[in-house]
Image (cartoon, rainbow, N blue to C red):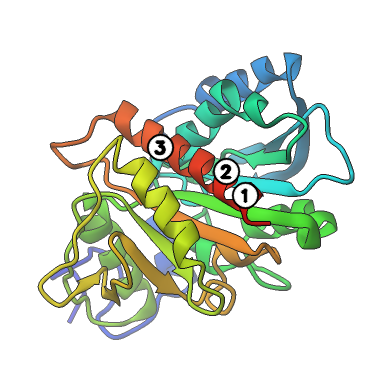
């Protein structure tokens, strides 16, 4: 019996092998340009920020340079704020929200913090509007030693020298309708597990670190974002995406043990944002603005409570 009842690749109950992964990869199509939409913007930032290439992805489909943007007035005695976007390449406002923060707000913090932004961690996924990388791996489950994901390994190398100086790390994400229609079914098929339908929350929410929660920090960001777009309510079980809601718009994950990007530093303040771009109540610009509002509110809170 094939798994086509919920995904067109693989055999029910059997994890994918190399053949199934190759079949999945062959289905992916370039839908937008990392070079045109990302690299050109990053290059323009060189006039006001330091831009560095911190790695390069090497896939059969081609090579993708990885860029980070730093404060030009970097000062060794200042704390570091780390902003990451596009760990899941399909999550558009994570990428464009990170760039919008650099273009419009990062200069506001000159002399107060060192800002380091990696706006598009997964360019292969960005071009194909895909959650995984070319190897059918989720980079946001691969942030651990000897990572099999090129994207995750490169970012960890970039951050390693600064790991203990990071005051705040905010990782910008989205939860989309395609999570339920494509990405979760693909995950179940890849791992040989049954697909269990879930609910997509309508609105913005945050993921705190269950091992070192900072509820007041999370609430400061929720209050700022609520002025831009709506906050996701809990479902009938008091949950968002299967996790208990611990405060309005906030759930918790064990960031480090799960290999999540937001857990790669020793930052006291860390979070993962989740915007809902498919809501009829939110525009793409609102989604970008919500990401920026969260970053700025988080920085202000972290600086005030060092």
Indicate the quadrant where residue 284 lies: top left
Residue 304's tag is 1
Would residue 15 be found to the left or right of residue 115 on screen?
left
Residue hosting label 2:
300
Give percent across and percent down for residue 302. Answer: 61, 52
Contact? badges 1 and 3 (CB < 8 Å) = no
- Left or right, 221 with reference to 147: left
Q: Which of pointers 1 and 3 lies earlier in the amino acid sequence?
A: 3
Per the image, the residue denoted by label 3 is 93
User: What kind of element bears circle 2?
Assistant: helix
Towards the viewer: 123 or 273: 273
How far across and how far down the image is residue 9, in percent? Answer: 29, 66
Q: Where is residue 27 drawn, in percent x and y?
A: 35, 49
| Residue shown at 26% from the left, 57% from the top | 182
Q: Secondary structure at mark 3?
A: helix
The local crowd at label 1, few if under 14, some if 14 to 19, many if 20 or more residues have their Cα within 10 Å, is few
Q: Residue furthest bottom?
A: 13
The image quarter in which residue 249 lies: bottom left
> In the displayed structure, would residue 304 be above or below residue 237?
above
Tell me how far mark 2 sits from mark 1, CA to CA. 6 Å
Instruction: Decide which of 300, 256 is in the foreground and name it.
Output: 300
Can residue 27 be spotted in the picture?
no
Provide the secondary structure element on which disc 1 rests.
Answer: helix
Residue at (33%, 73%) from the top-left corner? 246
How far apart marks 2 and 3 lie (CA) works out to 21 Å
Residue 107 locus on image (x, y percent): 66, 24
């Amino acid at each position: 019996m094939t798994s086509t009842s919920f995904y067109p690749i693989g055999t029910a109950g059997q994890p994918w092998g190399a053949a199934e992964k190759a079949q999945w990869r062959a289905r992916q199509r370039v839908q937008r340009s990392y070079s045109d939409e990302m690299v050109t913007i990053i290059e323009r930032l060189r006039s006001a920020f330091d831009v560095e290439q911190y790695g390069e992805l090497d896939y059969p489909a081609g090579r993708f340079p990885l860029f980070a943007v730093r404060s030009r007035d970097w000062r060794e005695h200042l704390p570091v704020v780390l902003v990451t976007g596009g760990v899941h390449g399909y999550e558009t406002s994570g990428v464009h929200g990170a760039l919008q923060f650099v273009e419009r707000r990062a200069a506001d913090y000159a002399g107060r913090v060192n800002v380091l932004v990696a706006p598009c961690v997964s360019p292969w996924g960005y071009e194909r509007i895909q959650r995984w990388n070319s190897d059918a791996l989720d980079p946001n489950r691969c942030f651990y030693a000897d990572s099999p994901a090129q994207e995750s390994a490169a970012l960890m190398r970039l951050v390693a020298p600064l790991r203990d100086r990071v005051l705040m790390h905010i990782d910008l994400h989205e939860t989309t309708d395609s999570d339920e229609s494509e990405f979760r079914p693909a995950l179940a098929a890849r791992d040989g597990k049954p697909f269990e339908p879930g609910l997509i929350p309508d609105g913005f929410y945050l993921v705190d670190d269950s091992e070192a929660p900072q509820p007041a920090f999370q609430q400061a960001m929720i209050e700022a974002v609520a002025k831009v777009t709506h906050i996701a309510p809990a479902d009938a079980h008091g949950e968002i995406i299967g996790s208990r809601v611990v405060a309005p718009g906030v759930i918790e994950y064990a960031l480090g043990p799960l290999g999540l990007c937001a857990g790669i530093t020793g930052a006291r303040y860390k979070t993962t944002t989740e915007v809902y771009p498919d809501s009829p109540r939110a525009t793409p610009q609102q989604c970008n603005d919500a990401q920026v509002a969260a970053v700025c509110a988080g920085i202000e809170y972290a600086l005030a409570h060092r």
